[in-house]
Amino acid sequence: MFVAVLILLFACLAPLFAQDSDYTLEARPTSGIRIDGRLDSEWNGADVAKNFVQREPGYPAPSTQPSEVRVLFDNDALYVGYMLYDSAPDSVKGQIQRRDNDGSSDFVDLYLDTFHDGRNGYWFTLTAAGVQAEGNFFNEQELSASWDAVWQSAVAITDSGWSCELRIPFHILRHAGARDDGWGIAFARKILRKNEAGFWPPVNPEIGWKASNLGTLVGLKDIASSSHVEILPHAVGRWDAPSEEVWASKNEWENLGVSVKLVPTADLTVDLAYQPDFAQVDVDDEVINLNDYPVYLEEKRPFFLESNELFAETAYRMFYSRRVTDPDYGGRLNFQKGKVRATLLAGKNRSQEDEEGNYDLQNVSAGRVTYNLGGRHRIGTTYTYLGQDGYHAATGAIDARLRWRERDRLQLWLAAVDRKDDAGAIEDEQPVEAKVGYLRDYWPVRAEVAVLYRGTDYNVNDMGFGDFSNVLRKAVWIGNNYYHQSGLFRNNGFDINAIHTTHTDGTHADGYVSFNSFNTFRNSWEVGAGSEFGDNWRRNYWADSTWDRDNFGSFAPEYYKYFYHWFWAYTDFNRPIRGGFETNYRSFRDGKTFGLDPTTTWRPRSNAEIGLKFTWRQIWDAADYGDSTVNIRYWTLKATWTPHLNLSFRGTFIYADQEWFQQDEQKLYANLLLSYNWQPGSWFYLVYDEAYRDTDPLAESRPGDRTLRAKLTYFFVAP
């Protein structure tokens, strides 16, 4: 029935708006290019993309500095050459940073839609210092930096500006071959000192970048398929020293593992993993969580990256891959053919160890299939499953995203959960969720109306990431962002949110109305402010009756009226020294709290950066705190040094000073990382973590829980 409704709605919509673009570029064949950053004679005669248009700050004005891009190809790779003229070549900025960081530099972007479906593809970034970054785009305009690949590039600074060359092997791309209608393609250039971003084809900042508005790359023929095999073995060493204890090794056969990617055809990939390292020693920063909700962490683990963006298309995250923490082995299949995309994964996972060192082996699986109804319209279905002795949890969902014109969107979502245990302790009453959201562009504002229903005991958190259940929520959003070609401001924006929520039985109504404004000055300073008023609940975990579930535990809700005011301001992020602060004043558990978060970033050299942030919260007259005034203070120092593009050091230190009920607590957290890219795709990491050190008094300081980890990976490709 639900599918029939989706098809009927689609049939009633206006025909898909198709862009008739003049932005077509022909790729020319070559016998090969020596990648040195300089556009030598091999590039002569190639078709040229030029006449870039500013997206900011002066759309639709031409870019202030000319840019030219050429594309060549041979059987194995795509070659892209950028000639980036600059009237002040000494002003070209390039900060040497760890891979996947493009801040504080001039840089160029390349976008490729290899199936030319106007929805999905790849992006590549190269800075004037030679720093690489890459990722996926999906759902027409959403970007992800999770995907990693091995490709070549080089940069050259010239008397007339700078130039660069990119070599993108065809085997790292999932593609449909040399299509008759070509590939989607686009280019961008950032000029740091001007805070200018230029695009080919042009991008209207009020509409935003969209995969459906890319240009077209034609001329490809006789190119290599994606067929190949990638192998990534690894070894991890771990040594732990719990507080006040000696170091002990935790190195067993489980510290050795391998990930393999099989690509038999361009539209099919298979990922296999045996004892993969999911410790994430190389990605996650030290995190201090100031509330009792878990922190959402981005995915960077190789086994999960291929097609992981499919799960991000949904209204709510049914599959959160970081739930799969410690698998023995796993497999994943990814497929794209015509209008169909699919991903399916399964494996054996170890649950978290208890105090006795025991854990349960879990069967885990997840999958998603989408069908492109035509350019901007998509229907999909998702499922997850977790099973272990005495317990299982499964979810299923169907969704649709329908778009017409440039900024109108209709979203539909229906999901259900089935959880069972042998003891009969789980009896979910209404484990169903549904959402309808409609976004409409009423110039000069945009408006969205949404209704969400979550039944009693609806819980996706065995494999997903969700918040509270047992609610019926109605929401209205109105807002827009306005760009100016002249004057004091580059852009001004605002949004108004109104949300009303009740329990599904109609009781305990709560909700809020908020107003938020954000503004960017012509000199790239930013400032914003807002207010929120509403009725809300707080969780009382110590009550002994009237328990509800919020998917992170049970609680007895206590309702109260609240207010929340905030203000923030930052200087230009692209300058060597940047400062700013955020401040807020709000009600808190029948009392009040004031917060202040000043921060500064200093780049003393092109390869070094130091950031310092102070977080202060003062709470008074709050329930559960008596008559005490509580002060919470955190100092966070983060420093990075990148002596070479392949070698980087990072240190994060957090000092916490808290006054609780006339008692002082001082704690120190530390995280140190060395990362060395010893050959393309192969890394060595050395990490030191100290999660807690009591520093009161400092003269009697005792070490906290310490961990030293080393990880070595070796990447190679077989034809």
Image (cartoon, rainbow, N blue to C red):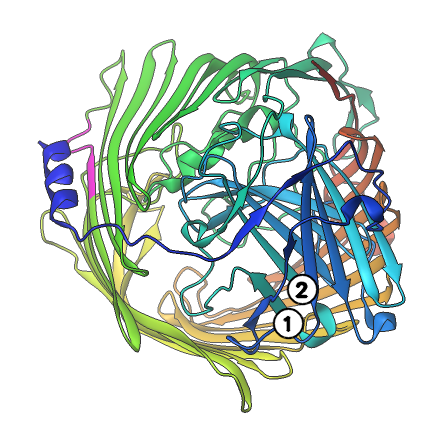
Q: Is residue 160 left or right of residue 206?
A: right
Whether residue 285 can be seen here: no
> What stretch of residues is rendered in magenta?
428-434
What residue does disc 1 label?
196
Residue 62 spot, x, y in % from top left: 59, 74
Contact between labelled residues 2 and 1, with CB atoms less than 8 Å apart: yes
Residue 245 spot, x, y in % from top left: 80, 29
Tell which residue pokes out farthest to the front in this image: 45
Please report the residue visible at 41 percent of the width from the left and 50 percent of the height from the top: 212
Asked if residue 196 is positioned above or below residue 98 in the image, the reply reads below
What residue does disc 2 label?
190
User: In terms of image quadrants, where is residue 1?
Assistant: top left
Whether residue 274 can be seen here: yes
- Of mark 1 and mark 2, the one earlier in the sequence is 2
Residue situated in front as seen by the camera: 359 or 143: 143
Residue situated in front as seen by the camera: 39 or 374: 39
Q: Residues within 10 Å of mark 2 (few under 14, many from 20)?
A: some
User: In terms of image quadrants, where is residue 26?
Assistant: top right
